[in-house]
Image: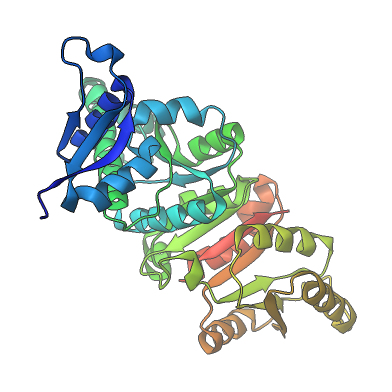
């Protein structure tokens, strides 16, 4: 019974052949019926038939044909305006961020852009600080093409793996494209963000202990400080796999108008109900006196305008902010940190890094940084 043929679609000859080709490329056996062999071009009502046990897979492919037909996707993507940008380096933590980005994109009905950048050793050799970074320029010139080809090959394998996971139902069916760029990663990310205006940039990071020990994560930190689009960072070994897993959020507020802008961005990106948000404030040296009035005003505004969320407040002490933050996240099982981030000049970023920058290296919790 499992091998019997069933009709999955009826099309004109051209559409039937196109569908047959797509399904066969994905491993589905297909046969066409009612084809006029003497003049197949004028045939109409061609039946596309498959084995019954291939029906679930065939329906998933047909419903998301644009994902498995890259030429159709490229034609459609020109008119799309909603994107989520996902920089990848093919490491395990960037793949974890990629998975979460697909769930974000499905909830926002957006497309994914996978971005990979590579640096030519011939260029980096001119920036070396010691002999340990010395490159042979002659050798690097010979390997320029191989570096690019290797990047293209790895991206092709990643795209094929994503399509296979969509076929198996492991990832939501989201249209995606990819781009490969040569250059400094943070510059490439900012450049394509200015071109595409993404809803969100999703980046993977390593654990806090690894980042501090090896100074890994500087690309993400630079993007947080310079990019003017929301950035979602996903640490290694993160405990959430889907957007619906986010249940408790700590929102660092500054008790000014910018908090409302950041909250509005958060509400547009997270649609699920039954979420608890803790409004946390770290008083700056400039803040003096009692801040209960503005804190209560912000709480009242949130409860009035975001009725699907539950709100509470937490005031951290300036001298013990780090210890208070660890206590807060441990007691409440925080799934996400949200930080409004002001743009700073290069000297401010160097000598007085922002809260988002500092939390990136100290917290193993996903973080959304909203530029204000």
Where residue 135 sits, quadrant-wise, is: top left
Q: Residue at x 72, y 76 (%)?
A: 282
Q: Which residue is more in the foreground, 83 or 250? A: 83
Q: Where 89 sits versus 180, above or below?
A: below
Residue 216 appears anywhere in the view: no
Q: Position of residue 206 (x, y in %)?
A: 38, 62
Taking the image as shown, residue 134 lies to the left or right of residue 329, namely left
Q: Which residue is more in the foreground, 262 or 273? A: 273
Q: Which residue is more in the foreground, 185 or 301? A: 301
Where residue 352 sits, quadrant-wise, is: bottom right
Please, which residue is most extreme toward the top here? Answer: 39
Residue 234 appears anywhere in the view: yes
Q: Residue at x 32, y 48 (%)?
A: 60
Quarter of the rendering occupied by the N terminus: bottom left
Q: Where 263 sits versus 73, above or below?
A: below
State the count of labels. Answer: 0
Q: Where 261 sits versus 182, above or below?
A: below
Q: Which residue is more in the foreground, 357 or 276? A: 276
Q: Position of residue 120 (x, y in %)?
A: 34, 30
Where residue 228 sits, quadrant-wise, is: top right
Q: Position of residue 321 (x, y in %)?
A: 64, 80
Taking the image as shown, residue 69 lies to the left or right of residue 291, namely left
Taking the image as shown, residue 6 lies to the left or right of residue 207, namely left
Q: Position of residue 64 (x, y in %)?
A: 38, 42
Taking the image as shown, residue 344 lies to the left or right of residue 232, namely right
């Amino acid at each position: 019974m499992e091998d019997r043929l069933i009709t999955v679609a009826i099309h004109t000859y051209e559409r039937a052949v196109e569908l047959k080709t797509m399904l066969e490329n994905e491993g589905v056996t297909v046969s066409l019926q009612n084809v006029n062999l003497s003049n197949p071009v004028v045939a109409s009502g061609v039946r596309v038939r498959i084995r019954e046990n291939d029906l679930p897979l065939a329906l998933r492919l047909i419903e998301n044909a644009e994902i498995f037909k890259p030429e159709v996707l490229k034609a459609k993507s020109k008119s799309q305006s909603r994107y989520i940008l996902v920089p990848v380096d093919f490491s395990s933590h960037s793949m974890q961020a990629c998975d979460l980005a697909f769930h974000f994109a499905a909830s926002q009905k957006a497309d994914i852009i996978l971005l990979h950048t590579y640096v030519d050793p011939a260029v980096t050799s001119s920036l070396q600080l010691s002999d340990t970074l010395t490159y042979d320029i002659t050798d690097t010139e010979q390997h320029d093409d191989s570096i690019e080809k290797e990047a293209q090959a790895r991206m092709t394998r990643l795209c094929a793996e994503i399509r296979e996971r969509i076929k198996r139902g492991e990832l939501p069916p989201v249209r995606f494209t990819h781009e490969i760029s040569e250059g400094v990663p943070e510059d490439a990310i900012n450049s394509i963000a200015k071109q595409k205006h993404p809803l969100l940039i999703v980046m993977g990071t390593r654990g806090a202990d690894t980042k501090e020990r090896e100074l890994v994560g500087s690309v993400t930190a630079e993007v947080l400080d310079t990019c003017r689009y929301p950035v979602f960072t996903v640490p290694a070994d993160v405990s959430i796999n889907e957007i619906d897993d986010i249940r408790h959020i700590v929102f660092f507020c500054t008790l000014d108008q910018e908090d409302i802008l950041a909250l509005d961005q958060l509400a547009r990106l997270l649609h699920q109900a039954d979420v608890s948000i803790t409004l946390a404030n770290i008083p700056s040296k400039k803040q003096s006196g009692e801040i209960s009035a503005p804190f209560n005003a912000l709480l009242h505004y949130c409860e009035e305008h975001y009725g699907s969320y539950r709100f509470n407040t937490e005031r951290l002490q300036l001298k013990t902010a780090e210890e208070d933050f660890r206590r807060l996240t441990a007691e409440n099982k925080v799934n996400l940190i949200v930080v409004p981030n002001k743009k700073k000049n290069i000297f401010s970023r160097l000598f007085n890094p922002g809260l988002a920058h500092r939390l990136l290296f100290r917290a193993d919790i996903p973080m959304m940084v909203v530029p204000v």
